[in-house]
Image (cartoon, grey):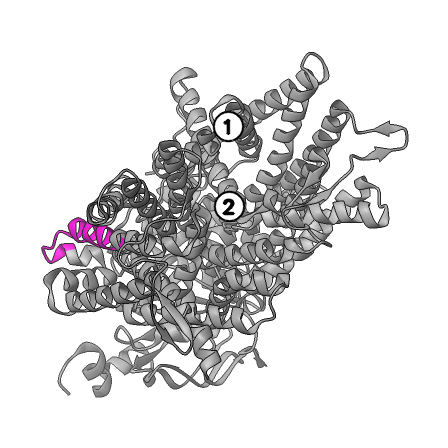
Amino acid sequence: MSQFLSYAIPGLPYGCVFALLGMGLVLTYQTSDVFNLAFGAQAYASAVVFFVAVQNGWPVWAAFLLSVVFGAPVLGALLQFGLYRHVRTKPPLVKLVAALGMLIAIPAVLQVAFGADQLINPPSLWLSPSAVYFHVAGDAIDGTELSTVIVTAAVALLLSLMFHFTQTGLRMRAMAESPRMVSLTGVNAEGVGLASWMLSSFLAGLAGVLLAPAFGGLQSTNFTELLVAAVAAAAAGSLRSLPWTFFGGILLGVAEELLSGYLPSGQILSSGLRPAFPFVVLLGLLVFLPGLRRRWARTDDPLAACDPPPAPLASSVGGPLFRRASRTTMALLLGGFVASAMTWISGSWVFTITEILVFAIVFLSIVLLTGMSGQISLCQATFAGVGAFTAGQLADHFGVSILLGILIAGLASAAVGVVVALPALRLGGLALALATLAFGLLADNIGFQYSWSGNGQSGIVVPRPQLGSINFTSNRAFFLLVLVVLALCIVVVMAIARGTTGRELAALRGSELAAASIGVNTRRLKIIVFALSAGIAGVGGALYASLDQSVSSSDFNTLISLVLVVVIATVGVSSIEGAVEAGIAYVVVNTVLTSDLPSQYSSLLELVFGAGVIVYVLHPEGVVEVAKRFVLDHVLRRPVEPEAVG
Amino acid sequence: MTALLQVLGVGKRYGGIHALDGVSLEVLVGEAVGLIGPNGAGKTTLFDCITGVRHADSGQIRLAGRRIDDLPTYRRARLGIGRTFQRIELFAGMTPREHLLVADREHGGDGRLWKDLLWRGAPRSDEVDRVEKMIAELGLEAFADAAIESLSLGQGRLVELGRALMTEPRLLLLDEPSSGLDSRESAALATVLNDLRQRSKVALLLVEHDLDLVRAVAERVYVFDFGRVIASGSLTEVLADAGVRTAYLGEGA
């Protein structure tokens, strides 16, 4: 028993932080229908501001006022006012990408503002982290743990009083049903929404400052990973109940510590399972709680039908001229690459262009899955990683030619795609996205750590291919190989798009219910599209490995999956050439522009595309589509809008 | 005439509420049957159980004698159950013509992935012809290639009807097809449905509040209240029934 307690008690402070963030998630999901995955990043922001203020000689109370009481709600209000307000009635992908954009942009902004150096030994808010106050079951209770538990308990009490006895609390509860109905009764719904954002951002900031001393140094990834635990806590409350979310969070924190206490130490499974545990819980809740799936799959605002339908995509109303323009753009781009790469540019630039094509293949996998089929995956980098490590390990251990290895890599990733698709069959929209996120984090923390797979941070060496007398160690030869593979992948996706499967996928994207009612086997279709998409991503990953000649698990971590989705969505996820253009954007911003900048700009990609979602939410068809529409409208003076229907 | 659809003692509970409480009804081959009753009486839940969107807790559902209650929705659709929706469910991003094409290809059942990959997945001329014919029959010409988002509710309901008909159903379930239509559009819909029945042997099961439409189309009606069938017969007969008047029209007995 005392051993049990000594494992369980250190979990309480973590549980408190999960509970605070989880309650913030539930609150804002109910009032504004956005699942704000950026709360982890907001917690990090408050922790950093608190740290810097204290470091500059501010008293702790003043730093707390600045970072949590003032800063956090202002950030929340800005996010709501500038971004989330616009996505309330938009499709799930738009809402998700908006939140993901902030998740990656906020840490990047902080890095630019406060430098790239790690902030070591964050100060404590209230009680000293090194002092031991008393012992429970042989466990030394330090200041961080004690203050976290006390502050969280106080906040929970205040919240429950507020919800039961104040006008604002009552209005927030009513907003959960329907903001429009609330505004029909004469309440300023926007104001209530804003208040809930400020309140939940305050909770996030508080969680960040409380937990910071538990980490040796402030790292954004520590905080963003907290969020999945918070999501699991919110899921335990069915995204509706604050008390259940609170207890779910506490329980999760305790269970996590118990697990790490009882599992044998020093093995990858046990060291990886602890951070991955919330994702396992989340997956389980998603698969086994049907009510939760429904709440996540669609909004149930009774007045939702008042919203105007989403505007049709530029590509669907553009007509033949528009499609021809799109194809010409892609042909010119590719032609330009080939001509340049084979003639005048230097070897290192050929490498860069090859990288663009490799990323275009990975982006193509998202175009197929998300753009054409409406399924959201947050583990495309994981699929690419499976491909990369399969090809690398086959070459290393079995001497399999890397060309054959790339093919097998595609098949292996496709098989993993099927495994991911099986539980995903019952999920849709945001629930599917979160399930794939959980899978990606599992692969990240466990799957890719073994020496037979990704070999963790050390990584593996992958050779360049050799085909008969052609040696692909030259950058130009390898460029041609990648070009051929990209062309093949594009042909496959185009063939699917114009055929039966493509029309079925479009129907699935439009309405799964109606698709099934005309006889579309939606389960089979989802498995097929996940397999194809994962397969294409796997081929891309294998080529990436062979291009770089060495890869590690950090090349395919979950953050990269998120960045990939944000980039392709911002550029244009609904067309094949969007994949090529996203490849260009990704590589140009990530490697070309950052090479000469000071180190705090190393997250330029996250900064540019994270902030870019502000443009994206206003134009969900992507900037490339907007640009093409502009050209047709204003330069060629050929309107692309269809004739008005009488 | 033989029974096409048999619903035998079907029950469905949500928590403590009996949405369907031992419902039995029958639709004969080629027959048009109306389902009327107050909101919340269980009519849409019954449709969901017949199409497999929800699974009944008890009872049996048979199509042409074959039990279908364990089959998934798409299998039931392929056996010949078509449906439209109360809150219309169209495929965003597809034109009305594409709605019909995808439904026709499903009915043809030759949508193999390898055919797509061999570049042989594009619509064939016979498919295009059938779609063209349906567009003409339902009068969709004016907006057949418009963006689906630009259609009015009435036009959207016609596209839904056409999509369901492309699968050549033996039984067509229509869930409040006239809701959101004006009286002129409702009358036109009655004509479309009666033309349809003259051309083909399709049976209709129609949930509808507009009694004029029910009278114009249905030969027989079932009256629902609190998840039970409380009366059946011709519309005139059941409207004369005292229990029906209390439940449905809110009149004292």
Q: Quadrant of the C terminus of chain B?
A: bottom left
Q: Secondary structure at mark 2?
A: helix
Q: Residue at x 58, y 31 (%)?
A: A580
**Disc 1 marks which amino acid?**
Val
Q: Residue at x 37, y 53 (%)?
A: A212
- Which quadrant would residue A480 be assigned to in this image? top right
Q: Is residue A312 left or right of residue A258?
A: left
Instruction: Give the residue pinned by disc 1.
Output: A589
Which of pointers 2 and 1 lies earlier in the amino acid sequence? 2
- In the picture, the disc for residue A559 is 2
Q: Is residue A596 left or right of residue B245?
A: right
Q: Residue at x 55, y 51 (%)?
A: A379
Q: Which residues are magenta?
A: A183-200
**Up-down relation of residue B170 to residue A202 (above or below):** below
Q: Is residue A70 left or right of residue A426?
A: left
**Up-down relation of residue A92 to residue B190 (above or below):** above
Q: Position of residue A110 (x, y in %)?
A: 37, 37
Q: Is residue A407 left or right of residue A516?
A: right
Q: Secondary structure at mark 1?
A: helix
Q: Position of residue B88 (x, y in %)?
A: 37, 57
